[in-house]
Image (cartoon, grey):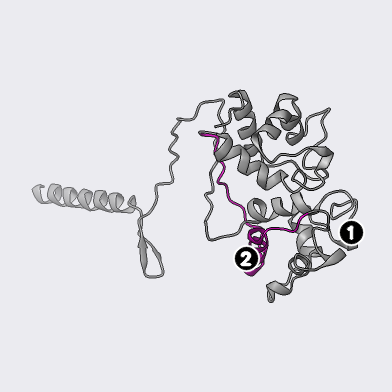
Amino acid sequence: MKKLFFYCLVLLGVIFAFQFQSCQREPVYIGDLWVQPIDTLPIIIDTIPDDTIAWNLHPCDPDTVYFQKDVLPILISNCTMSGCHDVASHKEGVILVDYAHVLSTGGIKVSNPSNSKIYKSLFASGEDRMPQAPQPALTADQKAVILKWITQGAQDLTCDDCTTDNVTFAGSIAPLLKTHCEGCHGNVNPGGSIQLLNYNQIITQVDNGKLLGAVDHQAGFKPMPPNVSKMPACYIEQIQLWINDGAPNN
């Protein structure tokens, strides 16, 4: 009887050990690299106020050119005005309002980036130069961005470096408007005779309500940029927060 009881205890011990072991996560191997298994149970950390939108979810690699963040704003601001390369005008069949059109009509040559039509036109002379006179030529940095994007495969990569924390004029608003608006509202032939090159010019458009109304494509305002989608929501929120704070020159 004692032996039977002993054997039962041993059997129960073996069963318990087997069940415990089966509950452990098996190690994961990627090549020769062992990776600690990750707990897939949801962990909810509620630290964001209900009225705040969380941005910056996909940080940007400084060595990578992103089409949506780096390339498209250059094209929209300098090349898609009416009569040029918007959808309605499609001059010479080239449309530069989004990734699909740039790839299909911009003469992109990943195998020979510097021979891409969209890039060569930046260095052409006379009427072949893009943007055409009287608009100024792209800067050397802007040309380099486009070439690097093609060299890296002309991919439709996205990332997010936008934040609504500590929005300032010098650190947030001025760079944003320079990237997205200066092509149309610079020194030469500014659209609507509106320049957005310095604080005094920008605050004028804040005070009359046109800046936010235009970039947010609100009813009763001429949408900016025209003929294309409005700028990313985080950038519009930056402008809204800055205006709500009194639009300081900080």
Q: Is residue 142 left or right of residue 7?
A: right
Of the 4 image quadrants, the one containing the C terminus is: top right
The percent position of residue 106, horizontal first and vertical second, equals: 79, 64
Sort mark 1 into few (<14), some (14-19) or many (20+) by Cα contacts within 10 Å: some
Magenta residue check for 75: no
Q: Which residue is mark 1?
A: 91
Q: Position of residue 139 (x, y in %)?
A: 68, 58
User: Which of the 4 image quadrants contains residue 142?
Assistant: bottom right
Residue drawn at point x = 52 percent, y = 49 percent: 59
Q: Position of residue 76 (x, y in %)?
A: 76, 50
Q: Earlier in the sequence, mark 2 or mark 1?
A: 1
Label 1: element kind? helix
Query: What residue is pinned by disc 2?
Result: 148
Q: Report the number of discs.
A: 2
| Residue 160 shown in magenta | yes
Q: Considering depth in this image, is 215 or 204 the residue closer to the camera?
A: 204
Tell me the residue at 66%/52% (across/down).
68
Q: In this view of the protein, which residue sits in the foreground, 118 or 66?
A: 118
- Left of 200 or right of it: where is 10? left
- The residues tagged by marks 2 and 1 sit, at their Cα atoms, a distance apart of 25 Å
Q: Nearer the viewer, residue 35 or 101?
A: 101
The amino acid pointed to by label 2 is Lys
The majority secondary structure of the magenta stretch comes to loop
* Label annotation for residue 206: none
When the figure is inspected, residue 149 is found, relative to residue 10, above or below; the finding is: below
**As shown in the figure, which amino acid type bears the numbered disc 1?**
Lys
From this view, report whether residue 244 is shown above or below residue 183: above
Q: Eyeballing the image, is 203 above or below 102?
A: above
* Residue in view at x 26 percent, y 51 percent: 15
Name the residue rendered at 76%, 55% in the picture.
136
Which span of residues is magenta-colored? 136-165
Q: Secondary structure at mark 2?
A: helix
